[in-house]
Amino acid sequence: MQGHNVAKQKDYIRLSHERCEKYGVEQDRIYSTKIITGDQLFKKMQEKSELIINTEPFMNQLYNFVKGSNFFAILTDEEGCILSMIGDEGILSEAFSLKMVPGAYMDEENIGTNAMGTALAEGKPVQVSGKEHYIEAYHRWTCSGAPIRNANGKIIGALDLTGYSEMVHSHTLGMVAAAVEAIEKMLQIKKYNEDLNIAKKYTETIIDSITSGILTSDLNGNIKTVNKHSLEMFGYSGEEIKKMKIWDLFDGWERVKEISIKSKVSILDEDVFVNSRMNKLQFNLSTYPILDDKQNLRDIILVFKEVKKVRKLANKIMGRQAIYTFDKIIGNNQNFQRVVDFAKKVADSRSNILIMGESGTGKELFAQAIHNYSERRDENFVPINCGAIPKSLIESELFGYEEGAFTGAKRSGNPGKFEIADGGTIFLDEIGEMPLDMQTRLLRVIEEGTVSRIGSTKEIVVDVRIIAAANKDLNEEVERGNFRKDLFYRLNVLPLRLPPLRERKDDIPILVEYFMNRISMRGI
């Protein structure tokens, strides 16, 4: 059986080398002959964002098995274009020097025999070791790759694990194949669930689009159902509100009940006072009777709308909140709208986002809009400018400190921005200014999902979506040694490039009209 496997391996290597000769690949070639950057790469990332998002958890899990052993994992699309990569710093540096970066094509025609390109060509998992690579620059490595197929069996990408030849075992290929199998099953299940739940999704979307508190009550005042928005409006948990009687919640129940029983008609837009957890607040109430098939009144639907929204306490403490939404972003330029559409598409992803753009292009505006478009919209949005905080204070700002951690520390200690942002979003502006030692700590937060305060050994679990922004080219900062490669690839999962106004001059008249109207309104 072992001899049979070797023979098969030699067979696909031989066929691959024949293809490389046909393509005219030089054995002393060092870099892929096709590397896309800038807008081309952004467009590719946009097109393949679903593949990146769905694959990332499995890619991280695969890498975690070999972390610290000089391996790196690569995801490509069906053409062999690198979409994302994570790995150990040392071997990543070597890959970086060979221009194995997002945007580089790893298909056989552009870089010769390798596990990614050959797996895509053969349509099966392959391992390419040492001199089996067609080009000499890759002889130091062993690559294990497998093609990824969607629910319809079409190849949509490839997953690869690469390490130094002496460190790689034949089981490495099995690990990659198992990860790909898990990805494919997940894609199949996802499609199946999407088909099954489409009717349910329609209903949920309609209910979620109604920013009102909706309750149902029987005629005895028992609260039977409560929607999520009601709990947020009134400040009670689901269990607490269902233990209450409807007349405990708002004034005017007897009148509502009387009209509903006598006339069996709706009451529209009446102002009532609700006993919320914190205060007695005014709301707008409409009621709708539920009748059975004999026209007997069974239950009453009550719909509450906020007359005046109360800001969240946490946002008051922070002094900042995410106020911008995508409908407040002005611009009809085609490329700009493409950026907006991509930002909306990735808003609910758990993956990190890196927003790149010159000063004034609206990086924080986009970060706030992404937060408000996501499922985290009701949680905290915590911005921090890494370039505006002294290097001596940035650690305590991000991670907090315990009592007595340093001279001048508060007696009760202080939570860091990651703790405050738990469940929500943290926006790290000017990430390129972050000191290298803080980059190491941030990488650990991303990998482990925990933070520890200065002066404490206790690990605090946090669920935080990271949106980073940079007005300088982080690729150049990586090359200069000012920014960690492994952190860059962790943050650069879903890159977003904001064009400056000079690249969207057709939006200038719209922006002029918008700001003129705003200025005019101030004078009224």
Image: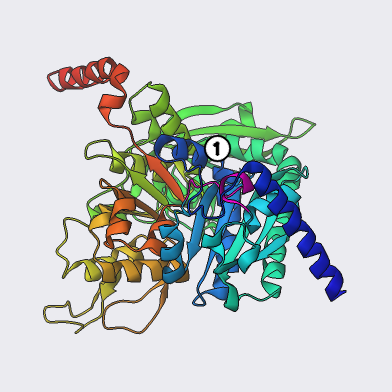
Give the residue at x 28% y 66%: 398
Q: Is residue 50 left or right of residue 369?
A: right
Give the residue at x 86% y 69%: 4
Residue 352, x across and y down, in percent: 44, 54
Residue 174, x across and y down, in percent: 72, 69
Query: Where does the magenta region start and end?
Result: 102-112
Any part of residue 101 in sight:
yes
Q: How is the image coloured?
A: rainbow
Height in image: 389 above or below 326? below
Q: Is residue 172 magenta?
A: no
What is the number of callouts on the image?
1
Instruction: Assign a secondary structure to mark 1.
Output: helix
Residue 386, x across and y down, in percent: 23, 57
Q: Is residue 199 left or right of residue 59?
A: right
Residue 147, x across and y down, in percent: 70, 53
> Crowding at label 1, few (<14), some or many (≥20) Cα neighbours within 10 Å?
few
Height in image: 97 above or below 156? below
Give the residue at x 53% y 28%: 267
Height in image: 54 above or below 251? below
Q: Quadrant of the C terminus?
A: top left
Magenta segment main secondary structure: loop
Q: Is residue 190 or residue 102 the one in the foreground?
A: 102
> Disc 1 marks which amino acid?
Glu
Q: Quadrant of the N terminus?
A: bottom right
Residue that badge 1 annotates: 47
Q: Is residue 17 or residue 352 the one in the foreground?
A: 17
Any part of residue 148 in sight:
no
Height in image: 258 above or below 28? above
Q: Is residue 228 or residue 424 the one in the foreground?
A: 424
